[in-house]
Amino acid sequence: MTIGVLGLFRPKTLLLRAPWVRAGAERFAPSGEVALSAGDGLVRLGGIRTGVVTAGGDVTISVPEKLKRTYRGVTCAVRNRGGELLVMIEIDTEQAVASVVAAEMPGAPLEARKAQAVAARTYYTALAPRHEEFDFCDTTHCQLLQDPPTRDDAAAATQGLVLKHHHHLFGAMYFRSCAGRTKTAAQVGLNPAPYPYFAVECPACAASPHRWRANVTKDEAARLSSESARLALARKYGWNTIASNSFSAVPEGDGVLLSGEGHGHGLGLCQRGAIHLARAGYGFRAILSHYYPETALGG
């Protein structure tokens, strides 16, 4: 599986550390970090200009003064895309799942993390590719991929398990918290095929939902009828401003006050609800059955 990483930073320069690096016809073992830069439609590494720089092993990539990440046991390729460095890693699916669980549910009970692992694996298995140049990205557009853990018990305990609806894979979606009840695909303006995302009760969020408020224009409020419309406004005002698809709208001055509950699109696994169920003694299979009705686990 190929994942495009660090694309949000649109880097023009990078620092790379790996057991081996290939640039053009040269393959060598660097003694430390090597600097890459974009220029003239190619990648520059010292005096070498080439179409692609590849590296392998435990690869550490730094965006100077912003971020450093390590990817274990991967093959990495860096090329120039329109004056920016495009970084792609070839990674084992199970390693990617472990990284998603670590990023999405740090410190959560094991059974909740197992449910997250199955959802993440199902998403990867069902939806590749989601991009033209690689299968997935490392952001919430696909799934968060950060520094992978040395070992993740949740991924290991569920290795190979995926969800199927009427024997068909589907991209199992998940989100941070709901307003006490999850959404159907139709409720957020999405095609219900191949999985309709049945609305189910969520006791934890019903008892104490995340609440938010936002001011928008009357025209913007009138267009807020789907997940795509919500995301469009979130890009304008900030990802946490219009936090969910569950809200009421009240005129206020020249605009509209939105008062909402929940955080995320509301489809599939509610992470907060899954943590609550796990603490109440539910196993991952029961958690998955609750949030993904009419599905079955398989390999």
Image (cartoon, helix red, strand yellow):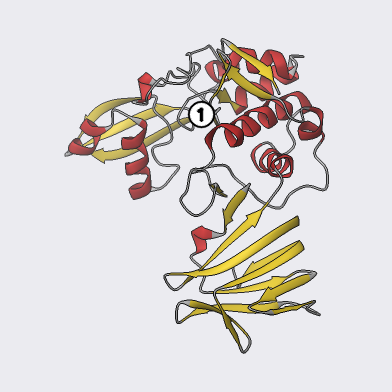
**For this rendering, which residue is in front, 265 or 61?**
61
Residue 243 location in percent, x, y? 43, 35
Q: In the displayed structure, would residue 223 be above or below residue 89?
A: above
Left or right of 243 in this view: 98: right
Q: In the displayed structure, would residue 18 be above or below residue 117?
A: below
Left or right of 134 in this view: 148: right
Q: Which residue is mark 1?
A: 210
Marks counted in the figure total 1
| Element at label 1 | loop
Left or right of 182 in this view: 145: right
Q: Residue at x 55, y 46 (%)?
A: 136
Residue 192 location in percent, x, y? 40, 20
Quarter occupied by residue 68 = bottom right
Quarter occupied by residue 13 = bottom right
In the rendered structure, which amino acid carries the disc numbered 1? His
Q: Is residue 212 visible?
A: yes
**For this rendering, which residue is in front, 51 or 214?**
51
Q: Residue at x 51, y 59 (%)?
A: 7
Q: Residues within 10 Å of mark 1 (few under 14, many from 20)?
A: some
Q: Quadrant of the C terminus?
A: top right
Residue 286 location in percent, x, y? 69, 13
Residue 171 location in percent, x, y? 53, 29
Left or right of 246 in this view: 32: right
**For this rendering, which residue is in front, 131 or 209?**
131
Q: Residue at x 66, y 62 (%)?
A: 76
**For this rendering, which residue is in front, 86 or 218?**
86
